[in-house]
Amino acid sequence: MFYSLHSYKLILLFSGVMDYKFINTEYLDSVSGGDSEIVREIVEMFREQVVEFHNEMKSFLEQKNYLSLGLLAHKAKSSVAIMGMSDLADLLKTLELQAKEGKETEKYQSYIDRFRNDTAEAVKELDDLVINGIKKS
């Protein structure tokens, strides 16, 4: 079977040869079929979502609107889970459950900080994936 250079890069990329700490490329591979434009669109949507989620989380925390914070953590959990960020998804599940009940409020800021830091690193990895891993030949 013959593969173009572009196809070979995608095979290497999605076979786990390129090692990323925060993201798992299996989802991107499954939904994009290796199409770099679809990957770019997914990455851009993720980038926009995580910024919006972070800003809303900060706002809900400042307002002590814990129920809304919990509901938002649930939404954010889905976005990070599809990028393979299972540890962060678990943390957001914890935030969701605690915030909905208004329990352990002193931990919420650290959860939000971790969300910001991990998603910022994930965006860097996704940018690398798009720029270096998926170039049209």
Image (cartoon, helix red, strand yellow):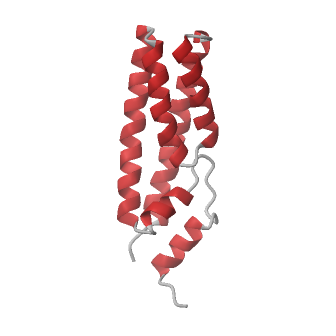
Q: Nearer the viewer, residue 9 or 59?
A: 59
Whether residue 120 can be seen here: no
- Residue 37: image location, x then y, percent: 35, 63
- Vertical comparison of 123 with 137: above or below: above
- Residue 27: image location, x then y, percent: 52, 57
Residue drawn at x 52%, y 17% as measured from the top left:
100
Residue drawn at x 49%, y 40% as measured from the top left:
78
Q: Nearer the viewer, residue 119 or 97?
A: 97
Q: Nearer the viewer, residue 132 or 109?
A: 109
Residue drawn at x 39%, y 23% as measured from the top left:
56
Residue at the bottom extreme of this rendering: 1
Say whether residue 58 is left or right of residue 103: left
For the C terminus, the quadrant is bottom left
Residue drawn at x 44%, y 22% as measured from the top left:
57
Count up the numbered dots: 0
- Residue 113: image location, x then y, percent: 54, 25
- Residue 4: image location, x then y, percent: 47, 84
- Vertical comparison of 68 with 137: above or below: above
Whether residue 65 can be seen here: yes
